[in-house]
Image (spheres, grey):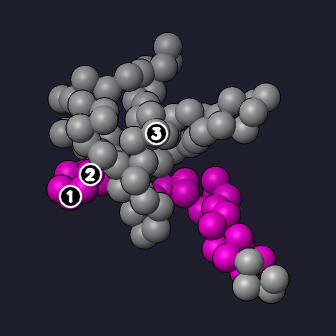
Amino acid sequence: MADDSRQDKGEKRFSKHIIGKTVVSKSGKRFGEVGDVVFEATTGELIHVVLRNITPFAEKADLEKTKDGETLIPFSAVLALGDFVVVAEEDIV
C-alpha cells in the first residue's frame, strides 16, 4: 500500500511548478512559457494553459485568445509535464 501512495505523490503537480515552464511541441517548436492555468471551478477540470513570452511561431499560429488578448492552449493538447510542457501541435494549430 505504501507503494501506491508514493506513486500518487509522483503524479500530482501544483500550478506553481508549471508556471514559467517552456511550452514546446513534440517536434521542438517553442510556443512560449506557461503564464497561468485556467480550470473549471466546480469540477477542477483543467481547461487552458495561458501563454506568456510568446514566440514568433506562436504569434503566427491561429491560437485561441482571451477577451484580454492572452494566448491560450487547450489543456487537452498537453502530452507531458516535466522540464518542459510538451503539447501536440496538431491539436492546437
The residue under label 2 is 25
3 to 63, vertically: above or below: below
Of residues 55 and 29, the one nearer the viewer is 29
Could you tell me if the residues under marks 2 and 1 are in contact, i.e. CB atoms within 8 Å?
yes
Badge 1 amino acid: Gly
Q: Residue at x 71, y 73 (%)?
A: 9
**Is residue 22 rendered to the left or right of residue 17?**
left
Label 2 crowd bin: few (<14), some (14–19), many (20+), radius 10 Å = some
Residue 79 lies in the magenta stretch: no
Instruction: State how far apart marks 1 and 3 are (Cα).
Output: 18 Å
Q: Quadrant of residue 16?
A: bottom right
Of residues 35 and 90, the one nearer the viewer is 90
Q: Quadrant of the C terminus?
A: top left
Q: Residue at x 74, y 78 (%)?
A: 4
Residue 27 lies in the magenta stretch: yes
Point out which mark residue 28 bears: 1
Name the spot of residue 48 as percent of width and height, x first. 51, 35
Q: Earlier in the sequence, mark 3 or mark 2?
A: 2
| Residue farthest along the top direction in this orientation | 67
Q: From where the camera sits, is residue 92 visible?
A: yes
Could you tell me if the residues under marks 3 and 2 are in contact, i.e. CB atoms within 8 Å?
no
Tell which tag, 1 or 3, sits nearer the viewer.
3
Find the magenta span and give its range. Answer: 5-30
Q: Quadrant of the N terminus?
A: bottom right
Name the spot of residue 18 as percent of width and height, x first. 55, 57
Q: Residue at x 18, y 29 (%)?
A: 60
Q: Earlier in the sequence, mark 1 or mark 3?
A: 1
